[in-house]
Amino acid sequence: MHARPGQRIVLFAYWGAWWVQPFVDQPFTTIEPDSSWRNSTHFGTQYAALLVDEGYRPPARTDSLPSIGSGVVTVAVVNGRPEFWQTWWFLLAAALTFAIIVAAYFLQRIALLAGEEQRFRETIETMPAMAFIARSDGYCTFVNKVWIEFTGLSVEQTVGSGWQIALHPEDLNYVVNKWRASLASGEALEHEIRIRRVGDGVYRWFLMRAVPLRDKRGKVLKWCAAATDIDDRQRAQQLQTNLAHISRVNTMGELVASISHELAQPIMASVVNAKASLRWLHHEPPDVTKAREGTVKIIEAGTFASEIIDRLRSLYKGSAPKQEVVAMNEVIKEMAGMLRIEARSHGVSIRTDLDENLPMTMADRVQIQQVLMNLMLNGIEAMSHTGGVLTIRSELATNGQIQILIDDTGHGLPPEKADQLFEAFFTTKPHGSGMGLSISKSIIEMHGGRIWATVNEGLGATFQFTLPSATVNPIGSKRADRTCE
């Protein structure tokens, strides 16, 4: 097309049954005469190229090819030539390249995940504990070699709920209920279970822990669990409990003679008062007042005998610790009275020096009695060949704790073995069990206190222990001396 000044070329694209001017009145739809152009929007599209003058006004829509007139000078039909990047071969190559890149990315991700999964499984297989993996609904999908070797159950036998056959029947319902509760709440699980060993059929204790693995939204994806063998620890704890009970029983054996004397006194007093009351009743006239006084003394003696029996029963029974408010001075007086005859038989007198304003403490009364009994008997035995004085003191330490001191005038402590006194099975006695001081140390430390021994400057040794006070006593200390002959 050849144009004169004032003329321009307008393109109409052919879309199906319609001729439409692309982007009406936009600059790039109008091409200056004698300029080269290639359509960059619709490659291969057929166009009507109109040579128009200044009187041309573009129509809103054209149903047929525009004709000459109304400012249109010439009409020609041309085909748009695409850029290279619009050709089919370029688009195909681009699509293939994109597909290759995406495939390579996903293959790389799959390889990385496979490597991580392999390392994860290797870690689980080499760990010294049993390991499990379960789905979010609790269905077991994986167990490691430790489980297989210990229980003799293969992965196929364990998956799902097959693991339950390895548990102790007494633990099964408890474990299943705990597991269901954790699945429902999504909270971590921790409990102790017994699992059967395939070699000898023995059930061992394990500590089971299971934690949920969540996605970014907090949804549980799966559960990871591990079971650690704690059977030796359980047995050690049971052994310690049994040894403590045995020590208590042995100590009571040593005190049977002393307790029998304690019981003989109120029983004899009851008999004497009963006979006296009968005599007063046989008088003419009967002396009811004297008989009543005798009856009251019988009741008092019986009550005292009952208290002695209760203390003996509490010390003998392996009952669970019971925390209560305890007045240490009262416990000291009780134990001093209980051991009075035992001390006399060895030529030992017991003296108490107690702080009257001592605060109370929270403790197991029976266990504190056991500690005092062990320490006092040790002191009495240390003076069994020479006689002497066993002094029990109570005071308020500078840190606010209650401090009890048991001081003897015996042969003292071996300096080279002072650090071993509170170790289990260590003893300086020919026939000792070596558990008394060890158990006393455990009891005091369990109550939040401390126990130790020192050598006196003169004769003997002093065993001391502390207990936390239940209240702070602001009143100044006041002492009361008492000697039990």
Image (spheres, helix red, strand yellow):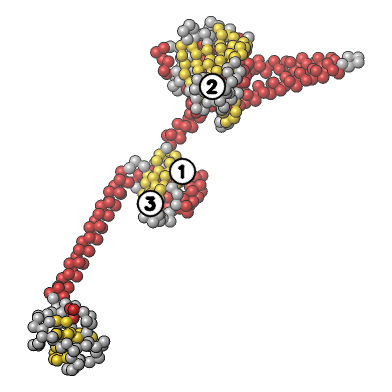
Would residue 315 be visible to someone looking at this image? no
Farthest residue to the right: give it: 285
Horizontal placement of 279 versus 482: left or right? Answer: right
**Looking at the picture, how far across and down is residue 163, in whole percent?**
42, 50
Residue 156, picture quadrant:
bottom left
| Amino acid type, callout 1 | His
Q: Earlier in the sequence, mark 2 or mark 3?
A: 3
Asked if one can make out residue 423 in the rendered structure from this viewpoint, the answer is yes
The disc placed on residue 402 is 2
* Residue labelled with disc 1: 191
Q: Residue at x 50, y 16 (%)?
A: 463
471 w.r.t. 94: above or below: above
Against 262, residue 24 (above or below) is below
x then y, percent, for residue 258: 62, 15
Residue positioned 58% across, 31% down in the render: 322
* Dot 2 amino acid type: Ile
Q: Position of residue 208 (x, y in %)?
A: 43, 44
Classify mark 2: residues with Cα within 10 Å, few (<14), some (14-19) or many (20+).
many
Q: From mark 1 to mark 3, how far is it between C-alphas? A: 19 Å
Q: CA distance from mark 2 to mark 3?
A: 50 Å
Q: CA distance from mark 2 to mark 1?
A: 38 Å
* Circle 1 crowding by C-alpha within 10 Å: few under 14, some 14–19, many from 20: some
**Element at label 2:** strand
Residue 213 image label: 3
Residue kind at label 3, given as amino acid type: Leu
Residue 438's disc number: none
Q: Residues within 10 Å of mark 3 (few under 14, many from 20)?
A: some
Determine whether 232 is above or below 46 in the image.
Answer: above
